[in-house]
Image (spheres, helix red, strand yellow):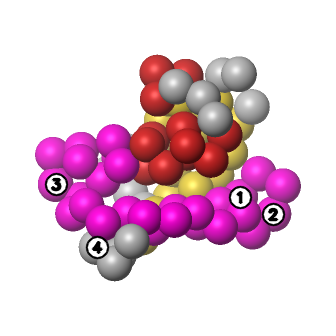
Amino acid sequence: MQILVKVKTKASQQRIKRLADNYYTVWVTELPVKGRANEAVKEVLAGYFHISKSNIKILSGKTSQFKRIEIDN
């Protein structure tokens, strides 16, 4: 399954909100430095979908706030 994610960094707490079938907004507490925010996004998504972080791949948008992510169940 592929989803689109808008990431908001430097949030007070990590959370996720589903906006449409395959579109989510994810708030993370990390700064967008050295991939830390991307790892935090993977953690939030893994918790939301109840899967391992290794099943989540960022297909595009590694340096953007808009990301296309593949989730393997």
Tell me the CA gap for discs 1 and 2.
5 Å
Instruction: Where is residue 2? Give x, y as percent.
Output: 70, 37
Residue 12 to residue 25: above or below: below
Residue type at numbered disc 4: Lys
Displayed quadrant of residue 18: bottom right
Determine which residue is flagged by label 2: 20
* Bounds of the magenta segment: 14-40
Q: Are marks 1 and 2 in contact (CB under 8 Å)?
A: yes
Q: Nearer the viewer, mark 1 or mark 4?
A: 4
**Of the image marks 3 and 1, the number of the one nearer the N terminus:** 1
Identify the residue under disc 4.
10
Q: Secondary structure at mark 3?
A: loop
Residue on which disc 3 sits: 33
- Looking at numbered disc 2 in the image, what kind of residue is underneath it? Ala
In this view of the protein, which residue sits in the foreground, 36 or 62? 36
Residue type, numbered disc 1: Tyr
**Labelled disc at residue 14:** none
First of labels 2, 4 by sequence position: 4
Label 2 to label 4: alpha-carbon separation: 24 Å
Instruction: Give the foreground label among 2 and 4.
Output: 4
